[in-house]
Structure formats: C-alpha cells, structure tokens
Image (spheres, rainbow, N blue to C red):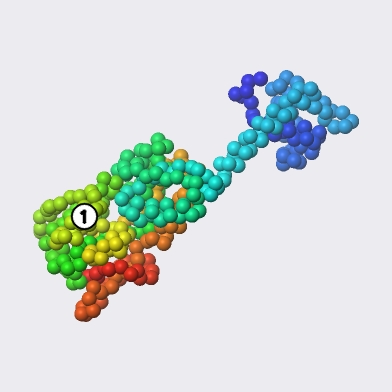
Amino acid sequence: MEFKQFDLNLLRVFLALLQTGSATKAATMLQLTQPAVSNALRRLRSAFNDPLFISSQQGMRPTEVALKLAQPVKNALDTLHKACARQKEFNPRASRRLFRLCASNFGQATVIVPLLLHLAETAPGLRVTTVNLAPKDGYAAMANGDIDLFIGFSPASIRGIIQEKLFDDRYVCLARNEHPHIRPGMTAEQFLETPYVQYIPTTECHDVLEQALSELFRRHRRKRTVPVRLDSFLGFVRLILNSDMATCVPESFAQGIVRHHQGIAMVRLPFDVPPISLCQSWHRLFDKDPANIWLRQTLKKIAASLAPQDAWHEASSTETHKPQPCSGPASPKRNVHSVAIR
C-alpha cells in the first residue's frame, strides 16, 4: 500500500474490530455509525489487499494478515498516545529542561531573581540562562527557537510575537538624598536645571520617557543636553550617589535601588510621562508548549507581587505639605527611603 496516502484513523477501527469482533460493537466503542465502520473496513481491506476480518458464527474472525498486524499497530498507536499525552503535561519538579530567557536589565532586576528563588524550591532540576539582546534581536531569536521568553518593557506588537502584560510601571527620578533640587516641592524648572544621567542599556526601549523629556524641554523653551550616557546600572548608581546628577528609571527598578542604597532618594517626576508595561513575550511557535505555558503562568504570579507600590512618604517631619499618591493599583506601603514631590 501507499503509506503516504493511508489514513491513520483507520488503524483505530482495525483495533476496535480486533477487540470486539463486531462492526456494531466497534462502532459503539469508537462513537461512530455502523456504516462509517463498514466503510473504514472496506478501505482497510483495499489498503492491505486482504479481507482482514471474515464473518463467522463467533463474530468477525481476523485473518492471518490481521493477526500479524495486530501487535505492531497496537504498539504504534500506544506510542502516539503517549507522545500526545506528554505534550499536554509538564512536571516542573521532575523536569530538567533548560529555559532560555532574554531579559532586560529591569526584567532581571525585578522578576528574574524571584523566579530563580522560586524554581530552587519548586523545580530544582530546571535550568535557566539569560542573554542580553536588544528587543528586535530578542524577537528574532524567539522566531528561530533560540529564546523561550523575552521579558522587558516591550515596544509595539511584533508580527508572530505574543505579548502579555506582567504589570504597569511608571518613571521616577533618582538622586542623592541631600540633592539641592530633587526634593519635595521640586518644580519642572528645577528638574530642567539638574544635570541628567541618561541610563539606556542596550536591552531597553525608553522612547516614552525620551519623548516626554523632549516635550518638557520644548515647552519650557530650553535646549536639552545630556552630559552623561550610561548603560551600566552600577555606573549610574555610583554617579548619582557622589554628584548632583539625577536620572529617571521605572519605579519597580528604583524601589530595589533605594532599598539597598540608603543614600539615594526616589522622587516623583514633576511632569507627566505615560505609563509603561513590563511584558513577557513569546513566539507563537511556543504558545501551546506545556513547559512554556507553565513558565509564563509562574512569572505572572511572581510579577503580581512585584508591581510598584504606592510607598511615598515625607522625607522630613518638618515638611508641611502632603505627598500626592501615584497613579496605579493601591497596595500596602513598603519600608523604603523615598521622597514625595508635588
């Protein structure tokens, strides 16, 4: 027979006839009509050039050819069933799969470390490796199957890439605690007069912030200059700790910095910047992959507890103004050193 033209569904009918010895019972087992089973048997006989089953007082008896086919066909279908079942299941505790993640600096600082700690307890056999790529290169790597997930502040949707928001974020300003301008009551003019450190790692897209800053300078009829551009997290932290320079970063990232560097204050911006979203992105090729689905669901649960908190409080008890709450979901205050401005 021509196997490339053979309908594998016929093998299910073959096994049902072999097991029941009756076209009627086989139809009931397979939830088919009796004419459908009879038609399948006719096609089977033609394909194998053998009657396969002969009617008798004891029912439909298999021929010698059918008996020789029985075990190989059963083994083949069992293998297919097991393969399909494995595709529907993923056991993280038993798996030793390697997940390849393209994560931005902010993605690594916010969700990757909590993910690794979670995996150490729930899936010790899983392995994770991260790479630093620009968004467009990360998306291309996913299309090639080299990357499982991209985690970062993603730009507009890309063909073939599925995106899911992990949480909304907003930009804030970071400066040293005793900065002469970056403090409660700071105006846009004072911000404009502050030397600015532009922190743009290669893995990030900050068009939203850059457009807002350009509009701020245009509105105030000021020429924008950027004396320092850095792509190193450690570089800008040391710089603002030891100078009057300031920078703007997403709040989820800033909260981690002020927790570990008490000399740095987190300050609300005195101008509007549209919110941004930390997303996880994957190629449609992996949309139904059980392991990829499990990883995405795990990241989403972790991210839900990491969204920026409304943790603003007064820097000094001598201040009389009240801080305005940031937009976004309300949540308990965190014990971080931060400064509120109006």
Q: Is residue 81 above or below residue 70?
A: below
Q: Is residue 90 above or below residue 178?
A: above
Determine if residue 104 is in view: yes
Q: Amino acid at mark 1?
A: Phe
Name the element at disc 1: helix
Point out residue 321 in the picture as x, y percentages from the top left corner. Answer: 22, 77
Determine if residue 210 is in view: no
- In the rendered structure, the answer to whether residue 154 lies left or right of residue 342 reads right
- Depth check: give the residue in front, 93 or 297: 93
Mark 1 = which residue?
Answer: 236
Q: Quadrant of residue 142?
A: top left
Residue at the image position 49 percent from the left and 46 percent from the top = 125
**How many numbered marks have been drawn onto this rendered protein structure?**
1
- In the rendered structure, the answer to whether residue 321 lies left or right of residue 52 reads left
- In the rendered structure, the answer to whether residue 311 lies left or right of residue 240 reads right
Task: Please identify the quadrant where the C terminus is shown.
Answer: bottom left
Point out residue 52 in the picture as x, y percentages from the top left corner. Answer: 77, 25
Residue at the image position 73 percent from the left and 19 percent from the top = 49
- In the rendered structure, the answer to whether residue 232 lies left or right of residue 104 reads left
Q: Is residue 258 above or below residue 101?
A: below
Residue at the image position 25 percent from the left and 65 percent from the top = 262
Q: Quadrant of residue 190?
A: bottom left
Point out residue 319 in the picture as x, y percentages from the top left corner. Answer: 21, 78
- Depth check: give the residue in front, 54 or 257: 257
